[in-house]
């Protein structure tokens, strides 16, 4: 049965690249925002939602984390990491005088990833934030009268007929983004060449237990479980109240992680599993672009 895949669009976004790389046979549906994509999965309008989770340069995508924790009970069933190559795109009519543009359009994360380039090349430019890099490219394509440029990828340039005037303008070479695959079911994906397995959990500490975080981390340490990430997010109940989001390089088993959960709960902590899933490192964007993928 062909699955319906939702992604942060429109066509040409990095999220679409992620969706193509792991679910090439799915029927893809674009959504204008991350919450809209996640809501569609929660309401079973789509089978799987693909949303950005973390960037190597700018860190976590807080909106995705907050909606996973506070708004929806959507298990993470897979993860894919995609290389991010940000380019400066202009309408073909602006190709000859692109260095005179006055406005730059893109997603806030993309703008932040290219901060040094923008400051050095266009220090007086007005920044316009969009819902995705591809929506910025679409805006530039649809409005040739704008003296602006979009920061987006090569797929967006091709999709909207834009000219790439500067390639790889991100500030750091090792630019990758992790994307989470979310579903209203517990069906875990199976990747042919998954890099590793991971479990993500949210832990709430008791307010009256000094040293509780140290005790929690010890529960993982003495079992020799590797934590690849630990991050605090506000509970939204008052200043100083936080969740801890923890990634463990271990799939759910019958002994180790259940032992951790029991020990942590015995300390008075709350534990919620966001997902136990395989992780995949995607190929380069250009390789994905060449695949004959059905829409």
Image (cartoon, helix red, strand yellow):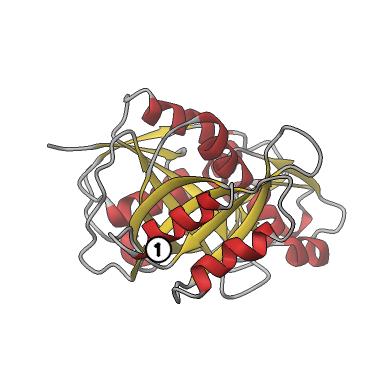
Asked whether residue 158 appears in the rendered view, the answer is: no
Front residue of 146 and 86:
86
User: Which residue is label 1 attached to?
Assistant: 285
- Left or right relative to 225: residue 85: right
**Residue at coordinates 56% horizontally, 64% vertically from top-left?**
229
Quarter of the figure with the N terminus: top left
Q: Position of residue 198 (x, y in %)?
A: 39, 62
Front residue of 245 and 19:
245
Q: Position of residue 227 (x, y in %)?
A: 51, 68
Quick check: 42 above or below 167?
above
Q: Position of residue 169 (x, y in %)?
A: 64, 67
Circle 1: element type: helix
Q: Position of residue 197 (x, y in %)?
A: 34, 64
Residue 231 lies in quadrant = bottom right
Residue 167 lies in quadrant = bottom right
Front residue of 68 and 292:
68
């Amino acid at each position: 049965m062909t699955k319906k895949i939702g992604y942060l669009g429109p066509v040409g976004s990095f999220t679409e690249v992620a969706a193509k790389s792991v679910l090439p046979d799915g029927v893809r549906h674009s959504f204008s925002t991350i919450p809209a994509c996640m809501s569609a999965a929660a309401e079973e309008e789509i089978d799987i939602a693909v949303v950005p989770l973390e960037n190597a340069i700018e860190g976590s995508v807080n909106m995705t984390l907050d909606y996973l924790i506070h708004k929806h009970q959507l298990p993470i069933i897979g993860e894919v990491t995609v290389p991010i190559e940000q380019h400066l795109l202009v309408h073909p009519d602006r190709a000859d005088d692109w260095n005179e543009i006055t406005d730059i359009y893109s997603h806030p994360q993309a703008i932040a990833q290219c901060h040094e380039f923008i400051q050095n090349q266009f220090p007086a430019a007005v920044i316009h934030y969009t819902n995705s890099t591809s929506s910025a490219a679409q805006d530039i394509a649809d409005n040739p009268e704008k003296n602006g440029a979009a920061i987006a990828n090569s797929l967006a340039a091709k999709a909207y007929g834009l000219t790439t005037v500067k390639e790889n303008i991100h500030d750091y070479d090792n630019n990758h983004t992790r994307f989470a695959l979310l579903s209203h079911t517990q069906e875990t994906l199976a990747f042919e060449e998954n890099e590793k397995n991971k479990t993500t959990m949210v832990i709430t500490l008791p307010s009256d237990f000094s040293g509780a975080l140290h005790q929690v981390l010890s529960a993982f340490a003495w079992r020799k479980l590797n934590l690849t990430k630990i991050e605090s997010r506000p509970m939204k109940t008052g200043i100083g109240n936080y969740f801890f989001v923890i990634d463990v390089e271990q799939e759910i088993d019958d002994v180790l992680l259940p032992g951790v959960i029991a020990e942590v709960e015995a300390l008075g902590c709350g534990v919620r599993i966001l997902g136990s899933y395989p992780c995949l490192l995607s190929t380069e964007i250009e390789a994905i672009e060449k695949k004959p993928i059905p829409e």
